[in-house]
Image (cartoon, rainbow, N blue to C red):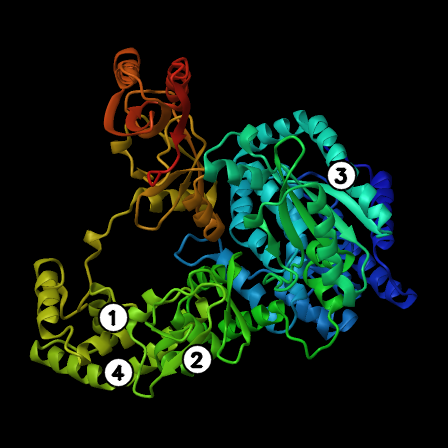
Amino acid sequence: MYVSDPEKERKEILKRYRNLLTVWNSKTEDKKIVRKAFNFAVDAHKDMRRKTGEPYIYHPLEVAHIVAGEIGLSTTSIICAFLHDVVEDTDFTLADIQSLFGEKVVKIIDGLTKIEGIFDYSTSSVQAENFRKMLLTLSDDVRVILIKLADRLHNMRTLDAMPLDKQLKIASETIYLYAPLAHRLGLYAIKTELEDLALKYTEPDIYKNISLKLKESEQERKKFITKFIFPLKKALGKQGIKYEIIAREKSIYSIWEKMRKKEIPFEEVYDLFAIRIIIDSPLENEKSDCWKIYSIVTDFYRPNLDRLRDWISIPKANEYEALHTTVMGHTGKWVEVQIRTKRMDEIAEKGFAAHWKYKNSSNIETNIDRWLNRIKDMLQSSDSNAINFIDDFKGFLFSDEIFIFTPKGELRNLPVNSTALDFAYAIHSEIGNNCIGAKVNYKLAPLNYKLKSGDQVEIITSKKQKPKDEWFNYVVTTRAKTKIKLALKEEKKNFYKVGKKKLEKYFNQLNLEFVKSNIAKFKESNNYPSLIDLYFDIANNKIGLKELKFFYQEDEKGSWLSNIIKRPFTKSKSSEHKTLSESIIEQLKNKPETLLLKDNIYKISYDISDCCNPIPGDDVIGIINPNEPIEIHRTNCPNAIQLMSRFGNRIVKAKWTDKESIGFLTGIKISGIDKQGFIYNIVKIITDEFNFNIRSFHLESTGGMVEVVIMLYVYSTQNLNNLISNLKKNKDIKKIDRINRISE
């Protein structure tokens, strides 16, 4: 437990400030303004403590250290790192900041300051609104995002002090938005640490197990690396090349992703590390020098040509440059070798900040510049709510891209699975709106033709062409979706007056009052998102008098007729009822509660989620949906992580009772040798020894091997683990796993 000691804390604050100065290459005049910001932050936060009990000023100090040392930003960013929580957490205002530190600093601070909002559980998301606000500042200053990433990194490093529901909320946001954003801005080291820390809280057992296995195999890896690089060091030395060779361990998160996707144990992940060769080379010789190193490596080790990646000729979207090759090592294991120059290595580690440092001319537009411009374009044209906006933005955080050539040979990059129509919108919105087809490699292709890297594309247009609703199914890029949405909205606006006039006529025919409240009720009853959409369909005879009559008659059966004079198109209060969600919402506003999952799930208003099939013993959380039952998910469920990243203020802590009187659906996947009696023995153990009911049984047998998927009802994770342990005693079973998601 933390014990406060004012003198010790004062010395620690000064020590951390000096540490910041050592990692920041500064001018004397810059130090004065940074010292002023430091003193201001110390004074502003003097009476504040973190959840750990430590002085709050430790947090801005560490954020400033990350900004200067790990991202490589300078004076203005360090000042903003010191002040980023002042407006939100103290009585100081943006006007106070502006008077002391200027307009540029106050703009960045405003972008970093959260939107103030009441603690509610409506369909809007405070998290999404805050993220949107932060991104809107991209049009002014990208440093807002970089400082926010530094802030998030330090919060993740100190997440142990937070309660479980807060840990899950913050970790889910991190894996869903912040880690991909760091990757897209080229901050590889920060992206990797954010992923690992998020896994630590969403999958604590997996994180611990992989960490332990990495530690246990560390000495063996060191011996292998020493032997592997020995001939390379000798050859590079003979050539007189200035170099550095380091071995970078694969992150815990990426190891787990490989284990999960390939369904393999830790021992079968062969690329636990990569050898990185960093050379000192002048800019004009970088490409030829890197290929020279590749030649030396392949003199000693045979390469896998399918795994050669040339990101020097065509850098990644985040400006990452390197040669990657995978070679066969001396012990029969594949080893990845990365070849970079010092410039490439700094850009790979520090991303956006290093990209600007090495940018030769303001006239050169790089991939990052184009990406930022496309985000600005999306921000300016987006009229969707914050949740849709975040989902749209997620589309920008793709990692894999394809490269397409225009008819004149210009290179354009697009996400994987992009179509000819995506390419048309990437060139210009008008070209997209008027697109009727394309020529791909001189052959005619439809709008929804999926492009491949290296395709040369010419767009065919017609002024008579207009966007259609089905076009949404043809595109994957957010730019294309946004432009189609805007074009359709403009088209529908032309029908607004016609549709409104028709609806008024229908209302008059039924002797109903044509007022806003009645129109809104009719719109909602037919699930239209806006009046523009409603009037468009009325104008085009897709909905009309028949639907209005039906709604009139349905409402007449209830409370509407008796109240038509007083309250037309409204329901009586007697029909209203509170769901469990609403009751818990009321409780949570006063005091956080833990939802107790009782043994009889039919007596309480919550749903066991189909996407992850939690069973008693699993770590679970509840997600509140207004007017609907609470959704119960496993804490590591991908759907739950997405929901928590968007609606963290709707998380309910949940736990199981010890009673075991109802079965919960789960599944196991078994791989083994196809022998007589194999299936009989498995079924016998499940039904006779454990008394579990089997819901479904799927079997596939090929080449002497058999794969079985069994869905069954169990009472708890302990039951399931006991079953798996028992089945593993059968020598013919080579692999057995729990199915985490129904889709598996």
Q: Which residue is mark 4?
A: 496
Q: Nearer the viewer, mark 4 or mark 1?
A: 4
In the image, what residue type sits under mark 1?
Answer: Ala
Mark earlier in primary sequence (2, 1) = 2
The image quarter containing residue 432 is: bottom left
Q: Which residue is mark 3?
A: 229
How far is disc 2 from disc 1 in space, using C-alphas? 33 Å
Q: Which residue is mark 1?
A: 520
Indicate left or right for 10 with 510 as reference: right
Q: Are marks 1 and 3 in contact (CB under 8 Å)?
A: no
**Residue drawn at the location 46% of the way across and 40% of the way down:** 261
Mark earlier in primary sequence (3, 2) = 3
Seen as rendered, the residue at the extreme right is 28
Q: Is residue 687 above or below residue 126?
A: above
> Residue 18: which numbered mark, if any?
none
Mark earlier in primary sequence (4, 1) = 4
How far is disc 4 from disc 2 in space, using C-alphas? 24 Å
Mark earlier in primary sequence (4, 2) = 2
**Image x and y of residue 524, in percent:** 24, 65
Indicate left or right for 403 with 335 as reference: left
In the image, what residue type sits under mark 2?
Answer: Ser
Instruction: Tell me the SS state at disc 3.
Output: helix
How far is disc 3 from disc 2 in space, using C-alphas? 52 Å
Q: Nearer the viewer, mark 2 or mark 1?
A: 2
Q: Which residue is mark 2?
A: 429
